[in-house]
Image (cartoon, grey):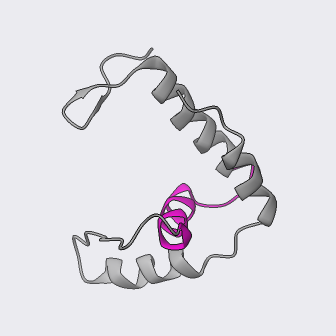
């Protein structure tokens, strides 16, 4: 699509990349940080037993905590579950 995109040491398929761009656009439309959606998804999904967040600087700890507390509209979760999976 736009050059080489890698994930898990391999090239990303166009379908996977389109899904990522769709999620980014969805977050922009709802005016919520993509990082908050990603983090909260992993924290509230019953299939995920633990979430490990890497923090590069001490001040990032508070930023990460704020992402977990960011209020997300209920409708965003419905739209996320409707995104086609490939």
Seen from this angle, which residue lies furthest right? 75
Q: Is residue 46 above or below residue 81?
A: below
Secondary structure mainly formed by the magenta segment: helix
User: x and y percent of residue 20 in the render?
Assistant: 52, 37
Seen from this angle, which residue lies furthest left? 9
Which residue is found at the position 41% from the left and 85% from the top?
Answer: 62
Which residue is found at the position 34% from the left and 82% from the top?
Answer: 61
User: x and y percent of residue 57 in the render?
Assistant: 23, 76
Q: Is residue 19 above or below residue 70?
A: above
- In the image, residue 14 lies in the stretch drawn in magenta: no
Rendered image quadrant of residue 77: bottom right
- In the image, residue 37 lies in the stretch drawn in magenta: yes
Q: What segment is highlighted magenta in the picture?
A: 28-45
Rendered image quadrant of residue 12: top left
Which residue is found at the position 66% from the left and 61% from the top?
Answer: 32
Q: Nearer the viewer, residue 64 or 48?
A: 48
User: x and y percent of residue 23 in the render?
Assistant: 60, 43
């Amino acid at each position: 699509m736009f050059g080489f995109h890698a994930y898990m040491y391999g090239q990303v398929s166009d379908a996977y990349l389109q899904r990522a761009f769709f999620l980014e656009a969805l977050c922009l439309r709802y005016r919520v940080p993509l990082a908050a959606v990603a983090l909260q998804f992993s924290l509230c999904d019953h299939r995920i037993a633990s979430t490990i967040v890497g923090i590069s600087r001490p001040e990032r700890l508070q930023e990460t905590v704020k992402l977990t507390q960011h209020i997300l509209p209920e409708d965003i979760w419905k739209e996320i579950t409707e995104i086609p999976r490939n």
